[in-house]
Image (cartoon, rainbow, N blue to C red):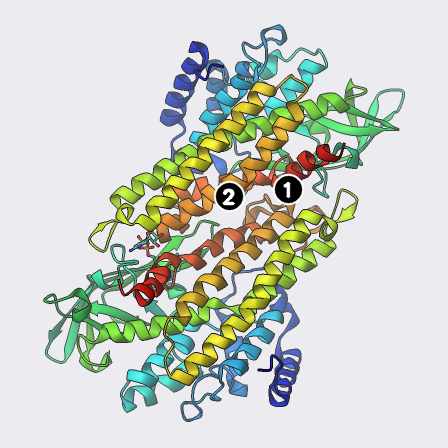
Amino acid sequence: MDFTPTDDRRMLTETLDRFLAAEYPVEHRMKIAYDLPCHDAGLWAQLAELGALGALLPEEAGGFGGAGFDVTTVFEALGRTLCPEPVLGALMALRLLQAAGQDATDVLEGTRRMALAVGEADGSPELDDIACTARDEGDGWRLSGRKSVVYGGPAAHAFLVAARNGDALGLWEVDAGAAEVAGYAMIDGGGAAELLLSDTRGRLVMADARAALEDALDWGRLALCAEAVGAMDRAHALTIDYLRTRKQFGRPIGAFQALQHRAVDMGIEIEQARSITIHAAGSMGTPGQSRAVSMAKSLIGRVGRQISEEAVQMHGGIAMTWEAAISHYAKRLVMIDHQLGDTDTHLARVMAAYAA
Amino acid sequence: MDIHYSADDLAFQAEVKAFLRDNLDAALAARVAAGAELTRAEMEGWHATLNARGWVAGHWPREAGGQGWGAVQRHIFDEECALANAPRIVPFGVNMLGPVLLAFGTPGQQAHYLPRILDDTDWWCQGYSEPGAGSDLASLRTRAVREGDDYVINGQKTWTTLGQHANRIFCLVRTATEGKPQEGISFILVDLDTPGIEMRPIRLIEGGYEVNEVFFTDVRVPVTNLVGKENQGWTIAKYLLGHERTSIVGVGFNLEAFERVRTMARNIRRGGRRLIEDPLFAARLAQIEIDLEALKLTNLRMLAAAEGKGQLGDAPSMLKIKGTVIRQALNDLARRALGPAAAPFPSEALEGNLALAAPEHAAAAADYFNNRKLSIFGGSNEIQRNIVAKGLLGA
Ligand SMILES: Cc1cc2nc3c(=O)[nH]c(=O)nc-3n(C[C@H](O)[C@H](O)[C@H](O)COP(=O)(O)OP(=O)(O)OC[C@H]3O[C@@H](n4cnc5c(N)ncnc54)[C@H](O)[C@@H]3O)c2cc1C
């Protein structure tokens, strides 16, 4: 075992941290995060140049990383600064393009943005519940149905759409211009969209995409766990800092043992969150991947909420304000549990394996 | 012991239900259910409806314009109003200043201000907290200096809830700097139209606007606006906080929040079944229902005991902790119930066919974040524990 990051990953961390701190400070983040398309094209190009996208794929697919730890390196950095850019959608799309053996150069270079349209209006995280359909019309494919809460949708040039063709679950590419895209900002910042398809033209990417989709979603979940760990670290640091500086009753509130113990418990839970994420990252590509990812996503959902609530409570009223950065960390940490299956969904998956 | 309502209580409950059925506008109730930010006119309209029936301040004594309700009647009324999605009665006059004036006000102050609370001539807000004085309220620094028949006030209050609608504010001000901080505080009534007052909005975590900062620069207030004696404000402040905490417990709102989650879980279908059939979700809900069933009685038992003794004691602190924790757990479940559909920023949520959730459930995430305030305000839950611990351990 070795828990030290490689030199390459450490350099990527430093590069991204420095860039995001300088170019994506809170004030800029607030401008982008709540204003459609919730995306800054200039900064996206620079993120791509710095390797934030290339790290997500292995060399044979045009990237320079692609391992679990490469993905967590990027997303932890994004989580530390609450970066609202649509990297999650890009990651899942890239993994699918790789699985389909398709060229992803323009996505990797940041010139073309793609999002994954998989979930539907009932919010089920299970691929079996997909109802969107695709039909071969001889002159090409037509897709119908509604995809819901597509992350990064408002900024996407094209969507990878999971749809049903008879018994098969396939994957098609649909141009943003060909479909109806209704975008909105999310409560924790960043953009999502409803994608409405009615006999909309699509290009077949994979006829049987079930395994590739499950895999891409696992990568997305791993990324969300890492993003949460980055955000938890910052939320904890902000809280410790506040406990040191905020004075009541003539002393820093950090002098009260009632708060000290809770600050310590936050730290313990964050270490647990980091470990389970490392466990998942190290399990990618192994037979234990899905189980490890579900364990991680379940723990992260539970602990993310705890860190959020404790950080807010220990800040007192100030954490209830839009102006305080901690309020935005608090929202992100809670809302991550609404993405790609929540703490109970993944707990149920771990439980289901017991009976099998 | 008898855990059932008496015949009189049941008759009263029926009367409240009938009143709500006949007088609460369905469209207004729907807006309350959807967690909409109510307009001033909507809040005033409901206040007037209740006042016409004599129920705006039912717990006040009859001589003051109330009904002299005890804990059980008050509970019945609050529960029925909450379940019917009636607008919340703005608490600052009815539940905070009213009891203070009844206990500490001069006959003149009572005669002048109490009717104006009932008929809504005055909308009060609460000027306790300051940027540097939150939990440590006694360290407040807003100064009031006596000059002839006036006090001249300088300083800043913050977190002033619904100050944007108010015409008056009751304030804790510093009138002496010697001795213990608690001994130099006075309780004073201020007309918000007085020159030198400026109010600025504070945007909250979910994007809404319900609190303000209030700045005082050479604000002249007549000495007759003092409640109680100069430098005796701390006793009054604590008395008011006891009443404020009791009203924050909100058993009625908890019951409404529970019904709301149960309805959501019955209506939302996910993965081919109703959410209520998901054993993990149902277990979470049942756990909270059990706590809530107990809280109903804890609340009534403690308030009845307090009525008997003539003082609230530690009850408000204990009830405030449990009531707010249960409410926050229900808000958490409501947010979870929506799954991915909880995501949209409230003002950006799509409508009509494109809506991700039923209108009355769409704000579940915003409500969850907003209600994190419940364990912070009215004295944080940590401060409530300190208060109870002091009683237990004498420390
Ligand atoms: C939405 C909202 C509405 C409000 N409305 C009003 C209003 O209308 N009028 C008004 O006057 N005020 C209002 N308040 C203010 C509220 O009463 C204060 O926020 C509250 O008293 C806490 O003070 P603080 O925010 O300064 O936190 P702080 O006092 O700075 O506390 C920060 C943290 O330290 C903890 N802490 C402090 N001292 C101790 C201790 N001795 N032991 C253990 N832990 C401790 C607290 O519990 C908290 O977790 C409102 C607040 C909010 C958020």
Q: Where does label 2 land, which residue?
A: A305
Residue B262 as seen in the image, left or right of residue B131: right
Regarding residue A115, the answer to whether it shows in the image is: no
Residue at image location 45% in from the left, 71% down from the top: B247
Residue A347 in the image: above or below residue A279:
below
Residue B221 x/y as whole percent: 21, 75
Residue B368 image position (x, y, % from top left): 53, 53
Q: Is residue A301 visible?
A: yes
The residue that mark 1 highlights is A344
Picture quadrant of residue A281: top right
Q: Is residue B369 above or below residue B125?
A: above
Q: Position of residue B387 (x, y in %)?
A: 33, 64
Of the 4 image quadrants, the one containing the N terminus of chain B is bottom right
Left or right of B288 in this view: A254: left
Q: CA distance from mark 1 to mark 2?
A: 13 Å
Image quadrant assignment for residue A350? top right
- Judged from this view, the residue extending furthest toward the bottom is B63
In which of the image's four quarters is ligand 1 placed? bottom left
Task: Compare marks 1 and 2 and give the one earlier in the sequence.
Answer: 2
Q: Where does residue B186 sit, x and y in percent of width and height? A: 21, 73
User: Dot 1: what SS?
Assistant: helix
